[in-house]
């Protein structure tokens, strides 16, 4: 089944805190797992991505943790800032992107 | 370099009408994909075109069609519009057909069907 489940639906954190968003997938044929950030009125923008042969990838304040055996992956945003307030989507792909349902992140100043 | 450009940005149509949405990919990108994003949900795959050929189709009715031109730009057509077609339509371009490299999205066309 081509499905990616994402949680939580919404998340509120204080400035400087850690934001954690989780995703789970079923299709073992997925070979690329990107995270997208979307601001209101804009298209999604790639934030960070990982391939299934890597367990962790870090870019600045953003880290993806990947657990192939559990078919789960997560996004950690360290030192969260108000400017990080947006909707975050996990996705998985073979030929096309299959998106999770999104997490609306609010970072309080 | 210009990113992915979509036109128009906003559109209001009446039920039963037809609509054409346009997308210009990033220069050098030969793959264009279309996604529908209903408010509060993640984007849903509609079509992928690569080198002017359809390479994938999502679970959408035959009222939805698309094509890619020799310059790799693309059109999405929707016939007999329904209220439920109201959504943000996103175009994404990428270098490869497999989408396992970075896909760049346009800012979308907001379609409202009344």
Image: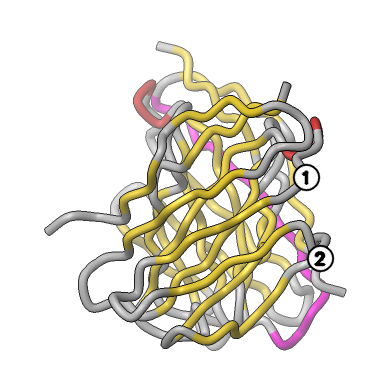
- Closer-to-camera residue (A75/A3): A3
- Closer-to-camera residue (A92/B13): B13
Task: Identify the residue at horizontal 43%, vertical 65% (top origin).
Answer: B74
Quick check: B27 above or below A61? below
Q: Position of residue B66 (x, y in %)?
A: 58, 66
- Closer-to-camera residue (B26/B99): B26
Report in which chain the residue with disc 1 lies: B
Report in which chain the residue with disc 2 lies: B
Which numbered disc, 1 or 2, marks the residue that appears first in the sequence? 2
Please name which of the two marks, 1 or 2, marks the residue nearer to the observer: 1
Task: Identify the residue at horizontal 59%, vertical 33% (top origin).
Answer: B111
Q: Classify residue A67 by image quadrant.
A: bottom right
* Residue named by callout 1: B80
- Colour mode of the rendering: secondary structure
Segment tinted magenta in the rendering: A16-29
Quick check: A94 above or below A75? below
Q: Which mark is residue B59?
A: 2
Q: Position of residue A92 (x, y in %)?
A: 63, 69
Q: Position of residue A100 (x, y in %)?
A: 70, 53
Q: Which mark is residue B99?
A: none
The kind of secondary structure element at disc 2 is: loop
Residue that extends furthest to the left in the rendered view of this protein: B1
């Amino acid at each position: 089944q081509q499905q990616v489940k994402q949680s939580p639906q919404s998340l509120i954190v204080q400035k400087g805190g850690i934001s954690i968003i989780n995703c789970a997938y079923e299709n073992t044929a997925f070979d690329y797992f990107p995270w997208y950030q979307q601001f209101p009125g804009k298209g999604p923008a790639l934030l960070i991505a990982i391939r299934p042969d890597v367990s962790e990838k870090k870019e600045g304040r953003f880290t993806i943790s990947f657990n192939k055996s559990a078919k789960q992956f997560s996004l950690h945003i360290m030192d969260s800032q108000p400017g990080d307030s947006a909707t975050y989507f996990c996705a998985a792909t073979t030929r096309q992107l299959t998106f999770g349902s999104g997490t609306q992140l609010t970072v309080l100043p | 370099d210009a990113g992915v450009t979509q036109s128009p940005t906003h559109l209001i149509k009446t039920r039963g009408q037809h609509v054409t949405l346009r997308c210009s990919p990033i220069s050098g990108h030969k793959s264009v994909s279309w996604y529908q994003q209903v408010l509060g949900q993640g984007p849903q795959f509609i079509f992928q075109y690569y080198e002017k050929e359809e390479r994938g189709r999502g679970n959408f009715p035959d009222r939805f069609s698309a094509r890619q031109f020799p310059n790799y730009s693309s059109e999405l057509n929707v016939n007999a519009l329904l209220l439920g077609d109201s959504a943000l339509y996103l175009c994404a371009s990428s270098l490869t057909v497999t989408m396992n490299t970075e896909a760049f999205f346009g800012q979308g066309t907001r379609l409202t069907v009344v």
